[in-house]
Amino acid sequence: MSKKKGTWGTEMNYVREVIRLHYELKKNRNEIAQSLGISHATVSRILGLAGERGVALLALGDAELKALMYPNPAGPKPSTTKAPIDFAHVVSELGRKSMTRALLYQEYAKANEGSAVYSYSNFCAQLRQYQQSHKVTMLLSHPPGEVCYLDYAGMTIPIYDAITGVVLFCAQILVATLAYSGYTYAEAQRAQSEECFVNGIVRALGFFGGVVATLVPDNLKAGVISHTKRVIRLSRAIVELAGYYRLWVDPTRVRRPRDKAKVEERVRAVQNWVLAPLRNEHFTSLATLNEAIAKGIDELNDRPFTKMTGSRTERFQTERAHLRPLPEVAFSYGRWLSLKVPPNYHLTIGEVSYSVPYVLVAKTVEVRITEGLVEIFHAGQRVGSHQRSYQTGEVVTDVAHLHPRHAAYLDSLSIETIVAKLVAIGPSVGALGDLLAGEPPLSEAKRRSLTRLLDLAHVHGAGELEAACHWALANNTTNLASVVSILETKVYLTGDQPRPPVSPIHDNLRHHDEFTNTEREA
């Protein structure tokens, strides 16, 4: 038993011990005073007030025993004639911005002008006593696998440029804690943005190896659009994440840190035991910083409890069995855009154009952009998706999105279609077309050559073109210019060799004799 006097309750313990030692153990006043470390006079006063009732006083409560032992307690008696103070109103007003106790005391004194009022010091003393008596907190208990708290640490870690040594940015530290076991995850992020926050939650769930029933984040702008007493508006990405993992997101109340006391305590632990030891380190990337944080987090989770046996890692082994299994594919953060479909029914996102169904021209669609996918939605239904491209100027088109006339036109321009038409004209024309197409890749120049060969059938007729191509293949003159010359000279009718194309005569042509002269003018 402590021998330091404090509250009335502690003094009542002394009173009970004095009575017990004297009436039950028959100890004298000197022995009692020496045993309890109190004065002989105090022992005599207690026994005198106890009188004949003796041991019967041990059954009394503190209030009754106090009234008997201290009928006139020290200190000034509160005056019953002074104007009472409405402490509930005072405490409520103190919660308002720029409100002070001095102003509230002035209002109290003015409202009771003409009556006796308490002094300012007495006013403040009674206010403190009222606040302490109404300062009650509730200890919450959480079943395993039920709640995960999320918050950012106030402490940041600078990331330096590897060459110049200049600070590029200060990494933000996200902390996630399971309520039951206290098992903790932390990571460094570039900023407290929506994308970083959502991806951090995904990695935290992966670290825990399962899904909890409820996420309790702070009121971060990255996840909570607005939070009033009646309505909580979460960001679209957080709503998507909650639906994907089938969990409930319940942000803490505004300016109520006790709602997330568990993670507040873990944030302090992360700052003290993980981040503080890294204060003199020079990190040039988030990857190296997160490696150091991961090592510190493992040590923190393995640290033994101070008030009970085991560690958070050991306690987590019990909680792990209560977590729901993770989906096979982790959630992918997506950025949303609302765009109007132009007449060419291709949406420009960044520097790449993606097609949408042509029937949606002039209508507004929603686009979800992830790291590897572009999805288009209209009226709540997905109407198209493309693999995301990072090649500047590329046009990504789904053939199913094309207008029928546009699809037919593109089909007519395809090399496969042109070659099929050439084969239909005749076997020799088809064989020459295959030679002109050559091996993949099929370039635009090859397509133009095939198209020109097909046009020759319209100019000279299918039969003439088949004969010309047959003669060209037989004489191994398979370039397009030779076929044109064969059609013009109709050499396939006479059996003569085709004449080479004649170049036009103009002033820029030089005779071959000019190149045989070895003398040059100075």
Image (tube, rainbow, N blue to C red):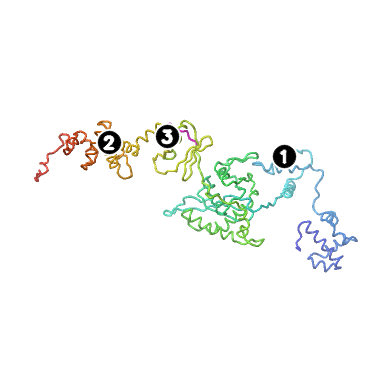
* Local crowd size for mark 2, using a 10 Å CA cut-off: few (<14), some (14–19), many (≥20): many
Vertical placement of 484 versus 287: above or below? Answer: above
Q: Which residue is depicted at the point 37% across and 33% down?
A: 409
The answer to whether one can see residue 198 in this image is yes
Residue 504 sits in quarter: top left
The residue lying toward the viewer, choosing from 16 and 341, is 341
Name the residue nearer the viewer: 461 or 185: 461
Between the residue at mark 1 and the residue at mark 2, the CA separation in whole angstroms equals 101 Å
Magenta region includes residue 339: yes
Image position of 469 (left or right of 78): left
First along the sequence among labels 1 and 3? 1
- On screen, 275 above or below 337? below
Residue under the image location 80 percent in, 43 percent down: 82
Q: Give the amino acid at mark 1.
A: Glu
Identify the element where label 1 is drawn.
helix
Q: Amino acid at mark 2?
A: Leu
Query: For residue 107, which numbered disc appears in the image?
Result: 1
In space, the residues marked 1 and 3 are separated at their CA atoms by: 76 Å
Residue type of the residue flagged with mark 3: Leu
Name above or below for residue 87 compared with residue 185: above
Is residue 228 shown in magenta? Answer: no
Location of residue 380 in the rendering, given as x and y in whole percent from the top left corner: 54, 36
Residue numbers of the magenta segment: 338-346
Q: What is the quadrant of the N terminus in the image? A: bottom right
Q: Secondary structure at mark 3?
A: loop
Q: Is residue 522 visible?
A: no
Q: Nearer the viewer, residue 34 or 476?
A: 476
Residue picked out by circle 3: 402
Residue 323 % position (x, y)? 61, 52
In the image, which is nearer the foreground, mark 1 or mark 3? 3
Residue 297 locus on image (x, y percent):
56, 58
Disc 2 designates what residue?
453
